[in-house]
Image (tube, rainbow, N blue to C red):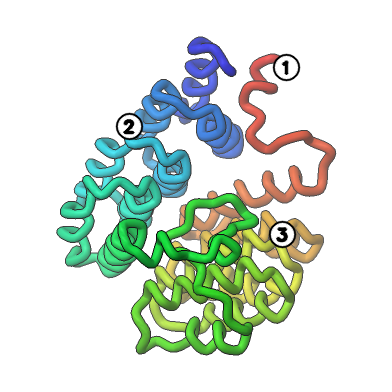
Amino acid sequence: MASAEEVAAVGEILVDPGFGLTQRFRALFTLKNLGGADAIEWISKAFKDDSALLKHELAYCLGQMQDKQAIPTLSAVLKDAEQEPMVRHEAGEALGAIGDPVVLDLLKEYSQDPVIEVAETCQLAVHRLEWLLSADKLAADESTAKNPYCSVDPAPPAVRKSVPELRQALLNESLPLFERYRAMFALRNLGSEEAVLALAAGLQCSGALFRHEIAYVLGQMQHPAAVSNLCAALERSSENPMVRHEAAEALGAIGKEECLAVLERYRQDGERVVKESCEVALDMLEYENSDQFQYADGLVRLQG
């Protein structure tokens, strides 16, 4: 357990723009791992920052912590039309991840948001909360619900099906988004190269929110078979920045030599969120190829 003073010292790094973005990211993930009211308070303070990437990651971490104390902050971010769409989207997803039905009405309201990525995210979050309250959840086969990545996802995995069946559902744009997400997470949990290639095909589908989630799960899988498709998504200048940013972070997580070259190339990209994502991804890539004990090393750095 960290003391309140140690949490505050890490928090000070997170909220101080004088520190490099990579160091602030490591401080953020340290706070996420520590948890508790003080960590949530420090993470919440950082939403005043001007980096959309950092604020997006703040919301992500608050959702993964699954602590109801984060609900007021996330609700305020979702409601704030001045915040970047990718930040508001992540706040909506985080509210769904926390899983408290108290936010159902708010999420239903923002399911009609004029920003499509925000609206779709809130629709998914409503479906997730309704699923958590349903008999289907109670009857779910534990073996299908097991998530080897320990993340809180926007949808539960589909009940066991073959890769071709899941691929068909994933790419079927006439199906509800929630069902396609269920296929996505089932494919991710299978983890095979066949599953990776099925998911990568989703990078050609319509809907920036959907493509960004595909890039995210490919990063979780860290499978080299995804590298060429993720590089193509990052290199597409016409692609939505939230997709390009997620592709960059995924390449950093995969951490292969060919990822390094493309991330170096785009670390000066004209789109700030892409540029910053490449910077963070290169730090992650360095970590993946090092003997560092942990990425979230904020406490270790304090002691050093």
Whether 211 is drawn above or below 255: the answer is below
On the question of residue 237 being in view, the answer is no
**Picture residue at 56% right of the left edge, 33% below the top:** 33
Relative image position of residue 162 (x, y in whole percent): 62, 84
Q: Position of residue 140 (x, y in %)?
A: 47, 65
Name the front one of labels 3 and 2. Answer: 2
Disc 1 on helix, strand or loop? Answer: loop
Point 36% across, 32% down: residue: 44
**Chain-order first, disc 3 or disc 2:** 2
Tell me the element at label 2: helix
Judging by the rendered image, the residue that carries numbered circle 2 is 69
Tell me the residue at 37%/25% (across/down): 41
Q: Residues within 10 Å of mark 3 (few under 14, many from 20)?
A: many
Task: Say whether residue 23 is visible.
Answer: yes
Residue at image position (60%, 60%) is: 248
Tell me if 109 is positioned left or right of 72 in this view: left
Q: Where the N terminus falls, by quadrant?
A: top right
The disc placed on residue 254 is: 3
Residue to which mark 1 is pinned: 304
User: Label 3's element?
Assistant: helix
Query: Which of pointers 3 and 1 lies earlier in the amino acid sequence?
Result: 3
**Mark 1 is on which residue type?**
Gly
Disc 1: CA contacts within 10 A as few (<14), some (14-19) or many (>=20)? few
Name the spot of residue 145 as percent of width and height, x first: 54, 62
**Could you tell me the amino acid type at mark 2?**
Gln
